[in-house]
Image (cartoon, rainbow, N blue to C red):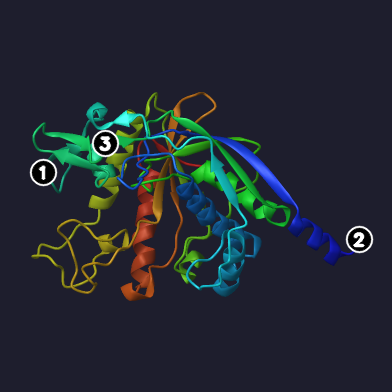
Amino acid sequence: MTAQAMTKSLQGRMETRQFTIRFVTPAFLGNAEQDGQWRAPPFKHLLREWWRVAWAEANGFSNDYRSLREQEGALFGTAADGSGNRSRVRLRLDKWSTGKLRRSEWNEIGKVSHPEVGRSVGADLYLGFGPLTYDRQSRRTALKTNAAIQAGEQATLRLAFPAVDAELLDRALFLIDAFGALGGRSRNGWGSLSLAGDLSDGKYPLRDWRECLDRDWPHAIGKDGKGVLIWQTDPFDDWQQLMRRLAEIKIDLRTRFRFPKEKPPHRQVEDRHWLAYPVTNHGTKRWDRNARLPNSLRFKVVQGEDGRLYGRIFHLPCRPPRQFQPDLGAIEEVWSQVHAYLDEAKRVKRSQS
């Protein structure tokens, strides 16, 4: 069989995968009423996100975004160009039920000190503001909607896709198990999930973090002269204790970058702004007030072989979009300080993977 005939044969053949998805922390997945519900579309979006990372790695971290978009559209489908290109990836969940964690059952996970507020704040509210809100009547953190998916809930996910695309999709599934989270505030560790099934194995897609600033989309886990930019917390027995620890780390990390004593919005872009934007009560006149810059430092909660829970902190570096007029010198300095802080932080150690 010729190479062309073999490729054509693979394009026509479908492969399947089956996994048990288990949430390690509560997930805020919204349905039409914004209540937490098991739904297939968010999982497809997550698969697509990490497929891009797998594609970049397989193509030598090429920044040929036209080829990326073309191949992504051919596999996952396109809706905007009017071509009617349907997705060749099919996903099915064995249930579409509402999450078991009800609004009345939400329990605060404890308070953490916040030097800029001048008092302690709810750790869950700090990491989950939006899906979580402050109930003035009870003076406690509460779910904004009626339900969320509780930690420990699980479902079966089945996938079917062309055999020719199996290598990159299997790679993406491996990365989802290692780094994936779903729903509101998932970058802060909410909606951390694990996949149990026939996962491929391999090393993480690594690239020097400064080189990653050549483009504005996440495509690799960063590394520096000391190794991979992944840190792990000490183990905890439950997700509540661990999320409280992650809140402490995030507050300490962000408040190290202090704002000048001037009435906001600030005249200049300050160091803190390059971490993530907007910052509560600290806008800048240099950027549109509706601008949104997501944090490229992410949290994930994973369960170790010992059954205990660990916080995984990892950097997916990329350049801010053009409208932010990125100052690469300032950005490199800020993230160098973040990496140094995590290297020196108590009860956190850099991963050797």
The image quadrant that residue 192 belongs to is top left
Q: What is the quadrant of the C terminus in the image?
A: top right
> Residue 93 versus residue 152: which sits nearer the camera?
93
Number of numbered callouts drawn:
3
Question: Considering only vertical position in the picture, is 110 above or below 293?
Answer: above
> Which residue is tagged 1?
118
Nearer the N terminus, badge 2 or badge 1? 2
Return the x and y of residue 91 as percentages of the image width and height: 56, 46
Question: Considering only vertical position in the picture, is 104 above or below 336?
Answer: above
Q: Which secondary structure lies at badge 3?
A: loop
> Which residue is tagged 2?
1
> Residue 200 versus residue 207: which sits nearer the camera?
200
Local packing at callout 1 (Cα closer than 10 Å; few below 14, some 14-19, many 20+) is few
Residue found 66% across the figure and 37% down from its top: 198
Return the x and y of residue 222 as percentages of the image width and height: 50, 56
For the residues labelled 3 and 1, the Cα–Cα distance comes to 31 Å
In the drawing, what numbered circle is on residue 92?
Answer: none
Q: Are marks 2 and 3 in contact (CB under 8 Å)?
A: no
The image quadrant that residue 107 belongs to is top left
Callout 1 amino acid: Gly
Q: Is residue 112 visible?
A: no
Nearer the N terminus, badge 3 or badge 1? 1
Question: Considering only vertical position in the picture, is 338 above or below 2?
Answer: above
> Which residue is tagged 3?
146
Nearer the N terminus, badge 2 or badge 3? 2
Q: Are marks 2 and 1 in contact (CB under 8 Å)?
A: no
Q: Depth-wise, is mark 3 or mark 1 nearer the camera?
A: 3
